Image (cartoon, helix red, strand yellow):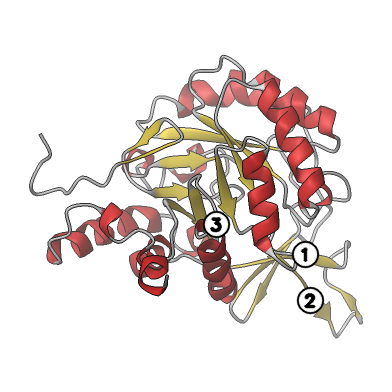
Amino acid sequence: MTNPARPDMSVELFGVRFKNRVMGASGTVGYGLELLDSLDISRIGAVVTKGISALPKRGNPPPRICETPAGVLNSIGLENIGAERFIIDVLPELSRHDTNIIANIFGETMSDYQRVASMFRGVKEVCALEVNLSCPNVKKGSIAFGRDPDTAARLIKKVKKSTDKPIIAKLTPNITDIVPLARSVQRAGADGVSLINTLIGMAVDVEKRRAVFKNITAGLSGPAVRPVALRMVWEAASNLSIPVIGIGGIGSARDALEFIMAGASAIQVGTANFTHPGIMGDIVEDMETYIKDRNINTLDTIQGIITRKHS
């Protein structure tokens, strides 16, 4: 029986039960363990690991982060320890905590994606794979596959054949129209989509008279991208039958509820974790308070209400 003092915040997505709809976004929570000094991760619905490749990757040279007036530019370049070390060294400790674990995966070629996906086959501690089709800070793979609907679909089909887990396609906002891309990955077998990844931006050091980042451009996240992300989540959710996970500048329960009303089944918190590492626990509690104060039995009542009211 549900505790009347704590509303039922759980949701089932692609056959997986989540205790609530708040997840830590890939690239902002490390492998999950990095949050433990500031947050009991068992309070959130899931940890989405930083991007993991089949082999370790060093990432881009510094500088990697630059603050902007309303967000952050990053050029990390998907540095990670590789799937084998993650499974052997990190996963046993991470899985002691009562939250779902979603592994974000990527590669430079389609075969790379298949290889890393297959490495998680049978790894019961990981409940789903988030397929990175959208990082703008690498020269091969990722966004190179994620801008074209046909290419993205081919990749999703290959990954789907390589794993026994639900797969979530993480989509890029750096395209003209999100709907054809979202529909394409759904037809290819994606069990869900997450969006948005970062918007491509840049910064210039006027004293050194050169671009801040070695790659010139970088990925913009934080409050600046939230209205764009919200619009794209609404467009995707209005056209798909699979769950949409909203990402983009979420830093409060009110932000999260905007995405759910726009159609998101769950949300991921990203850049806000850097300034307030315990923010996801606060968001869960504030969402509970919101639905209790308004006598809402479940967030299903308001999920997608924007679309319903305007259809």
Of badges 3 and 2, nearer the viewer stands: 3
Q: Which x, y percent locates residue 292? A: 14, 60
Of badges 1 and 3, nearer the viewer stands: 3
Which element type, helix, strand or loop, lies under badge 3? loop
Task: From the viewer's perspective, tell me whether residue 83 is left or right of residue 279.
Answer: right
User: Marks 3/2: CA distance?
Assistant: 35 Å
Residue 218 numbered tag? 1
Q: Which x, y percent locates residue 308? A: 37, 66
Whichever of labels 3 and 2 marks the residue nearer the N terminus, that label is 2
Give the residue displayed 35% in from the left and 69% down from the top.
254
Q: Which x, y percent locates residue 274? A: 53, 60
Number of numbered discs overlaid on the protein picture:
3
Residue 239 numbered tag? 3
Please tell me whether residue 241 is drawn above or below residue 117 in the rendered image: below
Looking at the picture, which amino acid does disc 2 mark?
Ala
Please tell me whether residue 206 is drawn above or below residue 55 in the rendered image: below
Q: Nearer the viewer, residue 179 or 258?
A: 179
